[in-house]
Image (cartoon, grey):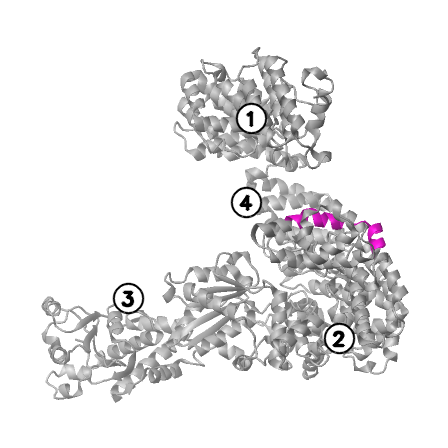
Amino acid sequence: MNHRDFAALVADDPARLTDLNKRQLVAAFGEAGSEGAGALAALVGRIPEWLQEASGPERERRHDWVKGQFDSFLSALSPAVLVRATEAADSFHSAAALHGALARRRAAVHIAAASEALTCRFAAEVPTESPVDQDIREQWTQGFLRAVFATGVRAGPQGEQATRLTRLLASSPKWLLEQLLDRIGSLEMFNNYAPALALSLVSSPTAREAFAAALATRDVEQHWRLFRSGVAATSTGQSDLIPKLIAQIELEPGSNSTILRPEDFADAIATESDDTARLFGAYLSARPTNHEDAFDLLSYHTELDEALSPLPEWLGFGFTMSMHSSMRLNRGAESKRVKCTFDKATALSRVDPEAAAWLVEQQRDPVYALDYLARLLRGPAFDDDFLRLTLAKPLLRERLRAAPATDGMATRVYDRLERLAHRHLRLADLHREVAPTLVSRFRAEDFGIDRIRFGTSEVTAAFREEVRRRLKSHPSIGEWVLLLEALQTPWLFEDAERDQTLSELDLSPCALPSSPTEEEVTSWVYALTRLHSTFPEVVARALAALGVSALRAIYQSLQAFNGSSWQVESRLLVLGDIVRHWHSHEPAAVAAAMSEPVLLHRDFWLLMRTGLGFAGVTLNPPSFVGETAPERWLDLDVLWEGEEQLIAVYLASILRHAPAVRNPENHDTADLASASTFIVALLNRHDTPVPAFVWPALAERVKDAKSLGREEVSAVLMAVLIFPDCPPRLELLQGGIAITRELAPCVDETTSGYHYATLKQWSCTQPPESGLNLNSR
Amino acid sequence: MGEVGEGYAYQWEVTAAVVLRLLRGVDADDAMAPALRWLGKIQSYAFDGEGELKDASSTSPNMEGAGREDLDFLSVDGRQLSVQIKKRTGGSWSPSSLSTFTKRATKQNSENHRFVFLTNADPSPKLAGQLASGLPIEWIRFADVSEFVESRPVIGVAREIWRTLEMLGIRDVRNAHASLCHQVMRWSLKGLKLTPDDVRTEVESLLVSPVMGERFVRPMEQVLRERAGLFTDQPFQGPSWDDLASGRVHVRPEVLALIDKHLAENALVVVEGPQASGKSVLAATLAHRAETRDMLPIIWDLAHGEPDRGLGEYVAMATTYARLRGREPLVVVENAHLASGAVLRAIATRPSRTPERTRLVVVTRPDQSFKGLPSVDVGAGLAGRGLQLASWYLQRFHGYTDEQAKRTIAGSRFFGIATDFWALWLSLRGFDPSRGTLPWSTRYTPIVRSLELLTQNPRTLYELLYVAAGLGRYELQTDLRAASRLLSVDFDTVRHVAELGGTAGILDVDMTRATCRFWHASLADLYWDVLRTRRREDIDRVRTKVCL
């Protein structure tokens, strides 16, 4: 396709574009010359409608193409390409249309970098006087509005927006600036760059003059919004710009008609943030009853800047992820979610310390009371005297001590006290005094390592006592596990103490009745899985205490060993332990149960989900010495017993189901080559030769891979190579290499030709007459 | 038997209880209900005080001629239900003690004329046998004779009447009870025949203010009529009754249809949306429509806290209040997010069957607590709705065509204001149709004017407005006691000026007169600007004070 095709294709039928990939589009656009800018602008403008026109699978296909190819093409348009297109465009208006169209698309990330080129074309071509011809005047007005939008719309910090816009506005003749201000309401996505536009309107002398005239003589809301933004943006630093603007407004005839005097309004805006902060400080000092609302407002934080409307997506909608937090939101309570636009720290620092102490005392919720304290302490006025005053309030201490277990309140108070303890000695004392009293109301899941590790000696003692007490008070199995995990926390117990506690451990929480329910079994497996690596001796004792019927019930539970990926290896180890114990009582029943199709299916896939030692990213290849969970499972005696050994079923199934090539969907599963490594190691450890069924199984995989392409076949052949050399292997490889020769390369060799490249590398070492060398026929 | 004349008290009390029950449209759990259902829509009530005497002298020559019992109901279909009311002090009713009535009933009974005997005792076995074998009388064992302990009824008919009156929020229940019975006695002694509307009007006139009234139940019409209206200098409280009546309020028909559907199916709808999204305008529209559909809309705004007796009880009171006036209630609960627990409790305690439930409209900001309830989200597509509202306004008030309106809106864009209906409204009111621009000053004009109208105690009021606006911009209410401390002005004065602000339609003072607020954050914003530019000297003292 050449450049003429690009413009023609866009003009004729954009649907045909879906035959092209991004590289072809980039190349065609790069060569498209003066027509390229206009053609691409038209195409971008047409796409949303084109997506809407189709329905069903066709619409999906188009959408996939836009996301996969066209957006990538837009992202790949470099600043240099865009500058060239801007300069080569057949007119400024085509260039402005291109910039406008691309500025609307998030994918066109480099368009802002070419704005200078657009400004240069504008400066060179714009008529200095208003054209007499109305159509020409209108065309320039529209082009300028488009250029202001494209230059201003957010791509980078606000300062850069303003710099770009200032250059553009400074190049504009007065008549066009007047047109801009007249049509201000039709600027696209005005909110996005209004502050930057305001800054550029007051920065350039010509623009300022036009702006002043508009403010004085017109009564347009958007102008005054820009005025407000301009005052706010220049309140620090460029302080002479607004006085200059105001002076110009006052020179204009009719300036007295503005409802709020510009000078007063500017002053009100400039002092607004400070005045509000002071008002809030004074209001809180006046001890209001709705202090909690005020503190929630002062604690509200959001990452979303509402003024910046996001660029739209192709289908007209887009996701905006936003994070909110506040004192109440952090507790899961409702909050008004109103954003503070003044300085919160100033507001809080102006609260009278005595009133602040009163506010803390008045807050009945102890967690909020400590939140108040934490926020107030950031201000310089809140020093030792303030803390002395606040902490002298007996009501506060009582509330802290009485924090109930409900809703994790005691834990929340504990955590806040701990954070505050480092801020001041008085708070450290408060922590020392109150924290130990809270431990008895912790939920078992709150005995976390960090809470215990960083506690004072009093707190550690309280934790120690509480863990011991609860272990003896017949906890539920869930709590029991959490308490055991707490027991293991470093520094909580001396080794001897821990050993003694363990030796006296009451195992009744993990006892199972002879006919347990599915839920009881699930809880049991969950608990034992968690304890398996840390307390193997406890697990062993728990297992030894189980009766045969309980062992049978656990093995047969589908719910407990379901398909989730949670702790797969530990669950497989627990399952293996269950089988071993049960096997020692009822070997025949175990063999029968493990051959039962549903249970066999479950066991096999639990095994496969371990990745056979290859799951995830590992720096070194795993070593197979019989210690990993999948090895221990396949080492089970019961699998190797009897004439029709179950191990054969497992190995054949692994060869059948291990994927030839890994992809994002199966990245936790061992691929066929890894599985073959695992199998060969297993066979070696058991001193067993490669069973005969392996070769037809691998031959079947070669056959299946043929329809998937050269890369898949190569991957299977690399797996075949892992097995020891023997005639069936040679035959299999020769057949496979022959197939590989016939198959075409995959679409993108650079990202997915690894297995073929490796196979080819190996085949080069083979003699040409072996039938294994890919370079010879 | 008791004293001579004692039976009248029972007769009039029972008559009063039956009248209240009918006016409220409540089915009690006794045999009266099927008889009234048979009767159908009532055309007139005939009261007769002679019945007791007639029966006492069983040979009265008037008996045949009168053809009337203590209470007779005539239906619009020509049916008649004759009710004889009698008290018995001890034992049961024998056939002989009722011979006159049974003779009348036997003689006059027909397909369209039934006889009912309301009493506090059972029939004797012999009379019961006669009733079972076809004596044409429906026997209704009604409430007992009233007994009072410390002037409060503990048992009997009076207890039923008191319960209803208490539910209506009557302050002086004893007096209301006596008045009602006295009125029934008057009607009976005069032998009046009244229409249901006559009876309703008379009962209402007995029970309304000052004994009963708005302190307890707030009819929405009254609230809306008190508003200045959107097209005045004080549009902040929302649309007035006149605005609604003259079609100057726009609500999307599909939203109303969805609300109607929810109300028909569940007698409940949650109107949810962010601030200034038109929830309250929608609620006002529903209220206006309800009135035209012969329902009685009643409001409770939780911004004033919960009702004294709880929201559930308020809904029950509102129901009684409306039904006593012969209308179905529609209860609007405003600002439900401020007490979502109370609202959920009120919803949970409603009767299980939809037809018996009072229709509830719950107006709230987005609140997870109401998830799963039938709802209408007015916050969805707010900008689009803002533009729709603008289009409607241009067509309705400037005579634009749909096309012209679309072009104008596309030209002006309405940036940043389409999602804030207050700012949009104030801007639209100053829209310049010749230039197609949104003005700036018109949003301030009503603010400036409303401040100019304040004449009494202006400085403290301005200072309070400054504080309330500064806080109100962030949706915070102003605690008047704290404001008094902040301003160093005594509390009574601050409360007084807050009420002046309330009277001027600028502030909303809560019912306990402890807090005040601006109606909306964007209004607080506008007042904040105007006070700080045009009233600087009036707020200078407080500005300086908070800087210290």
**Residue at 63% over, 34% down:** A663
The chain letter under disc 1 is: A
Q: Mark 2 and mark 4, same subunit?
A: yes
Task: Check the image and report above or below for A487 versus B99.
Answer: above
Please provide the residue range marked out in magenta. Answer: A64-85
Q: Which residue is mark 1?
A: A532
Task: Name the disc covering residue B29, or none.
Answer: 3
Give left or right: position of B452 versus B320: right
- B398 w.r.t. B269: above or below: below
Quarter of image, res A481? top right
**Where does label 2 land, which residue?**
A220
Name of the residue lying farthest toward the front? A777
Can the viewer see residue A441 in this picture?
Answer: yes
The residue that disc 4 covers is: A405
Can the viewer see residue A316? no
Dividing the picture into quadrants, the one containing residue A436 is top right
Amino acid, disc 1: His
Give the residue type at disc 4.
Answer: Ala
Q: Which of A689/A631 is in front?
A: A689
Which mark sits nearer the N-terminus, 4 or 1?
A: 4
Q: Position of residue B536 (x, y in %)?
A: 78, 76
Q: CA distance from mark 2 to mark 1?
A: 72 Å
Q: Say yes or no: labels 4 and 3 on the same chain.
A: no
Relative horizontal placement of residue B200, taking residue B228 as reference (left or right): left
Position of residue B77 in the picture relative to residue A283 (left or right): left
